[in-house]
Image (cartoon, rainbow, N blue to C red):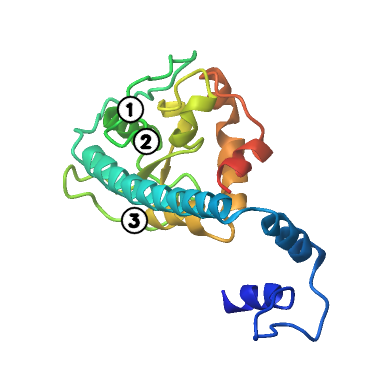
Amino acid sequence: LNLRRDEFEVLTNSPRRGWANRPPAKEVVALFDEFSRKSFEELTVQVKDILQEADENYQNNVAEAIEDKEYIEAVNKVPESDSGIKVLRDKPVAAKNAISRHTHVYVRDPIVAANALCNADYKCEVCAEHETFIRKSNGKPYTEPHHLVPIKYQSRFGVSLDVENNIVSLCSNCHNRIHYGADADRLLELLYTQRKEELEKAGINLSIDELKNLYK
């Protein structure tokens, strides 16, 4: 933050000279000129808007983390099917209008997720050899459901994203890698290639570049 402030101080009457030993960058000058033309009242409104947006983003992130934890716990409680029959959609399913108590998160059906895990034989779809452990609730190997096309973008699609075709089974490590890993794009490419036809059957159509952009 101090370094950022130093970039602007050379343009002001501040006794601190900041980076006076070099000319300010063009974007710094442009930003300074833009804000210099605003009144104190206008600046106050803009700063309040920025702070409000930051607070809303934080609250949304906290709420989403809570929803994710509750979702995984709900999936753990679903009795698993031993029928051996894969549950996949051969046509689009209508998008769900109902949303959870946090208005930015769409309801996800734990039974649909349990079907998807069963479809994958409770193995990680990045690599079936990835180590896991036995789920105490039903004796099955533990993997976690992940919506390949993130459910938070449901409003962009005219069909449901909460279908087995769009839910992959991941070990805990790969689930975190796809959210936070430096190699997340590589995992997305692998899973997208495996699921492209199934996604299309469910009416979920997008390119790999479009999918990657949803994770940025």
Q: Which residue is mark 1?
A: 99
Q: Please state if 120 lies on the left or on the right of 67 as rendered.
A: right
- The residue identified by callout 3 is 132
Q: Quadrant of residue 33?
A: bottom right
Q: Position of residue 117 (x, y in %)?
A: 35, 37
| The N terminus sits in image quarter | bottom right
At 43% from the left and 18% from the top, the residue drawn is 95
Between label 3 and label 1, give the one nearer the viewer.
1
Q: Looking at the image, tell me whether mark 2 or mark 1 is earlier in sequence order.
A: 1
Q: Residue at x 18, y 38 (%)?
A: 77
Neighbour class for label 3 at 10 Å: few (<14), some, many (≥20)? some
Structural distance between the alpha carbons of marks 3 and 1: 32 Å
Kind of residue at disc 2: Val
Label whose residue precedes the other's in the sequence (3 or 2): 2
x, y percent for residue 191: 55, 41
The alpha-carbon separation of the residues under discs 3 and 2 comes to 28 Å
Q: Total number of numbered labels?
A: 3
Q: Give the class, few, some or many, for how many residues have Cα within 10 Å of label 2's Cα (few <14, many ≥20).
A: some
* Vertical arrangement, residue 74 with respect to residue 69, above or below: above
Q: Which residue is mark 2?
A: 105
Q: Nearer the viewer, residue 57 or 68?
A: 57
Residue contact between numbered discs 2 and 1, judged by CB atoms under 8 Å: yes
Q: Residue at x 59, y 58 (%)?
A: 183
Q: Amino acid at mark 3?
A: Thr
> Which sits earlier in the primary sequence, circle 3 or circle 1?
1
- The image position of residue 100, as x and y in percent, is 29, 31
Q: Quadrant of residue 30?
A: bottom right
Question: Amino acid type of disc 1?
Answer: Ile
SS under mark 1: loop
x and y, in percent, of residue 70 in the image: 24, 43
**For residue 164, above or below residue 120:** above
Foreground pick, 43 / 80: 43
